[in-house]
Image: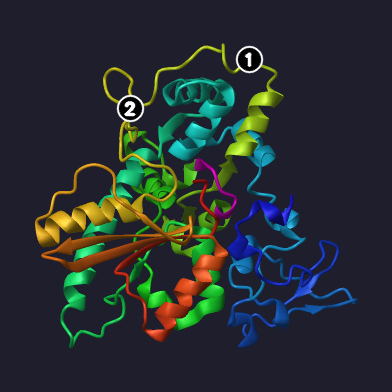
């Protein structure tokens, strides 16, 4: 697996700084020592040539606490986020639920020359023929995430108008939190001066994970720890997001992960091609209606747009909620230094009252971070994505 599959923000560090798969990583032989309670970082690792009394294995969760990023050892750490593991879980009799993102549906639809609805029905048929219990659509959780993001922005905007309010999490601009590559980079590299600005809203992947493990399992007559939840996403960074400790909870003294594994669009394409079936002509299956944005005629619906979409949705909502302005038609995003950095402004009586930005790609990300750090950022909301856009 090549590190180039991850976003630029996860490739910014020295990729030669890694622990080879053949080496033992010894953090501490004393579990009660102060060092053993620290986040595992590469500079703290000691590679021993002598057999240790007790080796401590480095997991993908530990990788998130590291000062580096994805390395040559990623094949070891990501072995439980693979297509082979997905098939193994099904064959083991585990109750497997799959959630498909609209971005992955769109990519597969373009590849096979089908509609997104056709792709979703065919994927449902394919997964269920393998033994998957249910197949859901994350556009429903995306809608929920956008609603929460709108509410959060209005709250923080109003609090920011109170000059005496200096509480953490009330400052502007609000930086979007749906891109795990950007969040991982911010946590490990930027520190406390940028984290208070980041939105507290979960990504659509984690929203649907929480909905399934906290609520849907009851409707299915299952326990959260008996369900293996897999999402299909367009981005390798989503694998990192799924294993974060923030998204683990306990049920009956058992740890439960909201999203157990992530398959990328490319991995699902590999799965389709490995089945030696004609995906374009294969039979379609009725869609599961729970957690799926589909009407009685089988049409998918929800907030339009590909990856992102936060800036546009929140801008329209804020214009109406704060300034009683209803925006019709497409937003007029102005391209600045490049197509991956754009802004949109709402004026009331000739004065700008809202100014949002789209910041895609690592080079633009660094410029925004610099402005926020210096207190010279003119935007109230910034949609941040670690990868360049496709427009």
Q: Nearer the viewer, residue 196 or 372?
A: 372
Tell me the residue at 29%/77% (across/down): 171
Regarding mark 1 in the picture, which secondary structure is present there? Answer: loop
Cβ atoms at labels 1 and 2 below 8 Å apart: no
Q: Which residue is mark 1?
A: 278
Residue occupying the point 54% across, 52% down: 238
Measured as percent of width and height from the top left, residue 185 is found at: 55, 69
Classed neighbour count for the residue bearing mark 2: other residues with Cα under 10 Å, few (<14), some (14–19), many (≥20): some
Q: Main secondary structure of the magenta part?
A: strand
239 left or right of 329?
A: right
How far from the left and from the top, in percent, is residue 27? Answer: 71, 78
Q: Is residue 235 magenta?
A: yes
Q: Quadrant of residue 163?
A: bottom left
Label 1: few (<14), some (14–19) or many (≥20) C-alpha neighbours in 10 Å: few
Q: Which residue is mark 2?
A: 289
Measuring from the top left, give residue 122's x and y in whole percent. Answer: 51, 20
Q: Which x, y percent locates residue 89?
A: 61, 37
Left or right: 290 with respect to 162? right
Please check the rendered image and state whether residue 73 is part of the magenta-colored stretch, yes or no: no
Residue 34, compared with residue 271, is above or below; it is below
Circle 2 SS class: loop
Q: Nearer the viewer, residue 327 or 222?
A: 327
* Cα–Cα gap, marks 1 and 2: 26 Å
| Residue under the image location 28 percent in, 50 percent down | 313
Using the image as rendered, state which of residue 360 and residue 158 is in the foreground.
360
Q: Which residues are magenta?
A: 228-237
The residue at 39%/45% (across/down) is 208
Q: Nearer the viewer, residue 345 or 46?
A: 345
The quadrant in which residue 126 appears is top right
Q: Nearer the viewer, mark 1 or mark 2?
A: 1
State whether residue 359 appears in this view. yes
**Which sits earlier in the primary sequence, circle 1 or circle 2?**
1
């Amino acid at each position: 697996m090549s590190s180039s599959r991850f976003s630029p923000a996860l490739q910014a560090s020295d990729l030669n700084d890694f622990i080879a798969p053949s080496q033992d990583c010894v953090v501490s032989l004393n579990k009660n020592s102060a060092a053993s309670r620290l986040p595992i970082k590469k500079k703290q690792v000691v590679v021993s040539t002598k057999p240790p009394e007790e080796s401590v294995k480095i997991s993908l969760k530990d990788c998130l606490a590291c000062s580096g990023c994805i390395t040559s050892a990623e094949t070891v750490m990501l072995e439980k986020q693979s297509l082979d593991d997905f098939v193994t879980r099904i064959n083991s009799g585990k109750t497997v639920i799959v959630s498909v993102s609209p971005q992955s549906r769109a990519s597969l639809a373009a590849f096979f020359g089908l509609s997104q609805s056709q792709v979703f029905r065919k994927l449902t048929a394919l997964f269920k023929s393998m033994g998957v219990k249910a197949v859901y659509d994350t556009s429903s959780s995306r809608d929920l995430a956008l609603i929460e993001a709108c509410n959060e922005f209005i709250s923080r905007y109003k609090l920011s108008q109170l000059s005496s309010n200096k509480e953490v999490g009330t400052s502007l601009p609000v930086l979007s939190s749906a891109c795990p590559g950007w969040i991982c980079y911010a946590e490990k590299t930027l520190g406390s001066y940028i984290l208070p600005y980041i939105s507290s809203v979960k990504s659509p992947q984690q929203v649907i994970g929480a909905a399934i493990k906290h609520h849907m399992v009851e409707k299915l007559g299952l326990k959260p720890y008996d369900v293996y939840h897999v999402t299909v996403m367009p981005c390798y960074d989503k694998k990192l997001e799924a294993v974060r400790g923030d998204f683990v909870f306990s049920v009956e003294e058992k740890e439960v992960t909201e999203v157990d594994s992530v398959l990328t669009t490319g991995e699902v394409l590999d799965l389709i091609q490995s089945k030696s079936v004609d995906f374009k002509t294969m039979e379609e299956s009725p869609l599961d209606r729970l957690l799926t944005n589909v009407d009685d005629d089988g049409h998918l619906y929800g907030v339009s747009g590909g990856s992102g979409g936060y800036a546009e949705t929140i801008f329209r909502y804020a214009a109406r909620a704060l300034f009683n302005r209803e925006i019709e038609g497409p937003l007029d995003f102005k391209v600045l230094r490049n197509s991956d950095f754009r802004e949109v402004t709402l004026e009331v009586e000739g004065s700008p009252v809202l100014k949002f930005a789209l910041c895609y790609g690592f080079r633009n990300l660094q410029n925004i971070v610099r402005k926020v750090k210096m207190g010279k950022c003119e935007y109230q909301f910034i949609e941040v994505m670690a990868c360049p856009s496709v427009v």
